[in-house]
Amino acid sequence: MKRMLLLALLPLTSMAAEIDHSAHTAAVQPAPVDAQHDHAAMTAAAATTLPASSMFITAHDHGGVLNNFLMAERFERQQQDGEDITVWDAQGWLGGDYHKLWLKTEGSWLHDTSEVDHGEVQLLYSRAVAPFWDLQAGLRYDDGNVESRSYAVFGVQGLAPYWFEVDAAAFINEETGLQLRIEAEYDLRLTQKLFLQPRLQLNHAFDDDKAGGIRQGLSDSNLALRLRYEVVREFAPYVGVEQDFGEHRQPDELRLVAGVRFWY
């Protein structure tokens, strides 16, 4: 009798074990994820939280496809020494996760004489060495109110803690020796569309540059404060004030500036 009862219960025991195993498997296995949707969500979240210029460092190639990014950080009108000038400062890259080719340019154009007062172009190879940080090396070419010159460039660019954007570079020329430039800026969000950006640039010359009118020490440094309104994230007009200072010069008067920042 007992044997017959055990034989009758055996199929029910096996069925219960299968049900329990299926429930356990469903509990431990993650739900299927739409990878494409997940990546889009992460990209959108990064675009709303990180500074726009940090996308220079954080963008990825995903599958070996080359990406590119270009930003005109400053394109503005100002008065300097009684002259109207247009100032530009732009940079961008082409590449993937770890290797990029960078192009940087900045300078000023005099309206009275319709001439470039100072123009600078850098072509750099960049290698990612840490999250948000790139090492860079390449060439810089200057032209304008002094004789044309070329420099070897070695630098580092990235996003420091608390979202400080830093760009530091050493420039080496046979005639002028070693020069060091450090730029740092920070975006303080006042509203969803209004930002206040302090910006500091320090230039240090380790040797005299007689042709360029630069003496050894801290020279041609700049402190600025700009208030911009993002019509859309990629386009933002701004106004601000700017002042030059240095170890061997008296601080200039505050200059009013007005311009636009855009990227794509």
Image (spheres, rainbow, N blue to C red):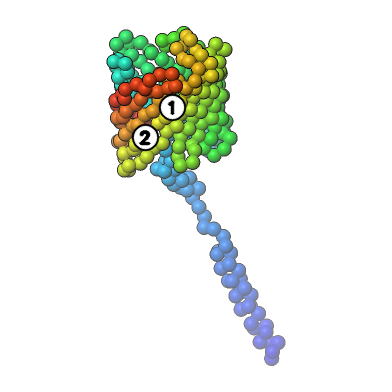
Residue 89, horizontal then vertical, whole percent: 40, 24
Q: Which residue is mark 1?
A: 201
Which residue is most to the right? 3
- The residue shown at (45%, 17%) is 120
The kind of secondary structure element at disc 1 is strand
Q: Is residue 189 left or right of residue 56?
A: left
Between 111 and 83, the one nearer to me in the picture: 83
Q: Which residue is mark 2?
A: 197
Q: Is residue 253 left or right of residue 132?
A: left
Q: Is residue 12 visible?
A: yes
Number of the label disc, if any, that sits on residue 74 = none
Q: Quadrant of the N terminus?
A: bottom right
Between 159 and 32, the one nearer to me in the picture: 159
Between 55 and 174, the one nearer to me in the picture: 174
Residue 18, horizontal then vertical, whole percent: 61, 71
Q: Eyeballing the image, is 200 above or below 108?
A: below
Q: CA distance from mark 1 to mark 2?
A: 13 Å
The kind of secondary structure element at disc 2 is strand
Mark 1 neighbour class, 10 Å CA radius: few under 14, some 14 to 19, many 20 or more: some
What amino acid type is highlighted by mark number 1?
A: Gln
Between 190 and 56, the one nearer to me in the picture: 190
Q: Is residue 146 left or right of residue 196?
A: right
Count of marks, rendered view:
2
- The residue shown at (66%, 87%) is 5
Q: Quadrant of residue 48?
A: top left
Q: Eyeballing the image, is 30 above or below 129?
A: below
Residue 140, horizontal then vertical, whole percent: 51, 18
